[in-house]
Amino acid sequence: MTFTTPDKTIKAIRPGDPNFIIIDGFMMADRAGFEISNNMPYEYKLIIYECLKNKWLKPISYIKESEYVWEKLGE
């Protein structure tokens, strides 16, 4: 019995990958990140900070392969 798997159509981009940082002229920004509400209790913010610092929690971005190809062609 033979199984075939479809080609991946979604690309994961992580910190440290070449395309994680988006550059538009003089502006640079990470492709993914976290937005923390001002209403979040301070203790939880400290916990999240500790997780980020120790790289237990990392931002990740997902993009369709087709969009990624068009993005690369536009460079």
Image (cartoon, rainbow, N blue to C red):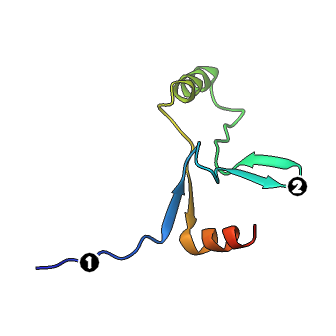
Which quarter of the picture shows residue 39? top right
Which quarter of the picture shows residue 64? bottom right
Q: Are marks 1 and 2 in contact (CB under 8 Å)?
A: no
Residue 62: percent from left, percent from top: 55, 59
Nearer to the camera, 25 or 64: 25
Residue lying at the far left of the rendered structure: 1
Q: Residue at x 10, y 79 (%)?
A: 1
Nearer to the camera, 63 or 43: 63
User: Number of marks in the image?
Assistant: 2
Q: Residue at x 64, y 49 (%)?
A: 32
Residue 18: percent from left, percent from top: 62, 50
> What amino acid is found at the position of numbered circle 1 in the picture?
Thr
Q: Residue at x 67, y 68 (%)?
A: 72
> What amino acid is found at the position of numbered circle 2 in the picture?
Gly
Q: In the rendered image, which residue does mark 2 sit on?
A: 25
Q: In the rendered image, which residue does mark 1 sit on?
A: 4
- Quadrant containing the C terminus is bottom right
